[in-house]
Image (spheres, rainbow, N blue to C red):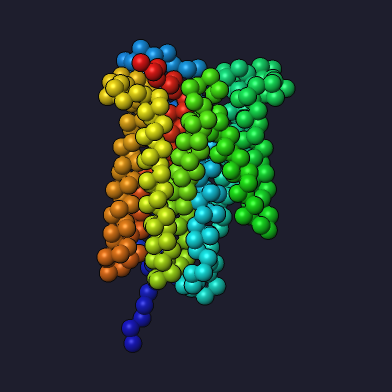
Amino acid sequence: MTSTRPVPGAVPGTRPRERHTGTGRAVALLALVVLGALIPLLGPSAALHGTGEARPPGAGGTALLRTVLFAALCIPVGELFVNRLARGLPDAGAAGAPAVPRSWSPAACTAGFAAALALACVVANGNLVPGALSDIDPGGLHATRDGALALVEVNAFLVAGLCALSRRPVTQVVPLAAVVVAEALRAHPTTEQGPLTGTGLTLVHLTCAALWTGGLLHALRTVRLRPGGAGAALLGRYARVALVLLAAITATGVCSSLRRMPPGTVPEQLTDTAYGRVLLAKVVLVAVAAVLALWARRRLHRAADPLSACVPARAEVAALGLAVAVSGLLTALPVPIRW
């Protein structure tokens, strides 16, 4: 008879390789979060270097808050989206395993509420970072368009968080939609040429981006609980919709860019303005994510193990996470002048 000795330090019921994989993913996630925070914090100085443009006050802090707000929007939107896609699929997980992973929406909405509240304080101080509480004029928020939109975002995240904790988390759709509309309106002031057109483009762009980014993240989390055919079926459903989302993001992104940078000036502004440089970085990241998405789709349909598509899909999530950080940075930079 052969006796089996436990590996020193091993946890019963786990395999060393699985523990190493989990540690590696945790380290990779931490590195991604740190990099995602450094991009908006240090990005303004790098993007503005040599352009001759003035740096907006508090650009780094504003960019970081916008990044947190965008990420906080993506997570609950993605959860609602994928949970709907997963309806009707068989639960292929182990006995007793939940069909849906634990929701991150309450934590995300809390972070979004904090970021929106901080941004509202900036607006209440005339779009300047307040140096003291006495600098903030909460009553003045109702008197300006930007202030009213900031209040809408604060209240919307608060309501979305309460809905996420309720018995019907699907009711988050309404307050989350309010955040998207408020962001689209904020990005296009009434003084802009054709503000309604710009608002519509941003509305579609932001909605599709949140569905793509947050949806892929939640789909990968769900697949871990639904291995085999159920997981592959869920990824297949997501992949079909993701192609449409990518097409919409590309079309609206190109149209929005051309509205701010006329075709004849695009090559020069992409290298000589801070906005153009960051926009170029975002295009590269989205292109990388698109290539990884196509690679994952190819594996999903042609590989012996369809779930091997999760490998490029995880890299796709990382690229999209960095794109969210770059988007936050983009909102804090001066818009290029229409030449």
Residue 78 percent coordinates (x, y): 50, 51
In the displayed structure, 57 sits above or below 226; it is above
Residue 154 percent coordinates (x, y): 64, 35
**Residue 322 visible to the viewer:** no
Residue 35 percent coordinates (x, y): 40, 37
Q: Nearer the viewer, residue 60 or 249?
A: 249
**Residue 55 visible to the viewer:** yes
Location of residue 131 (image quadrant): top right
Q: Quadrant of the C terminus?
A: top left
Would residue 198 be found to the left or right of residue 311 on screen?
right
Task: Kindly identify the residue that appears in the image at 69 percent across and 21 percent down.
Answer: 143
Most distant residue in the right direction: 139
Q: Nearer the viewer, residue 53 or 7?
A: 53
Q: Quadrant of the N terminus?
A: bottom left
Q: Nearer the viewer, residue 81 or 230?
A: 81
Would residue 225 be found to the left or right of residue 152 on screen?
left
Location of residue 177 (image quadrant): top right
Task: Kindly identify the residue that appears in the image at 31 percent across and 42 percent down.
Answer: 287
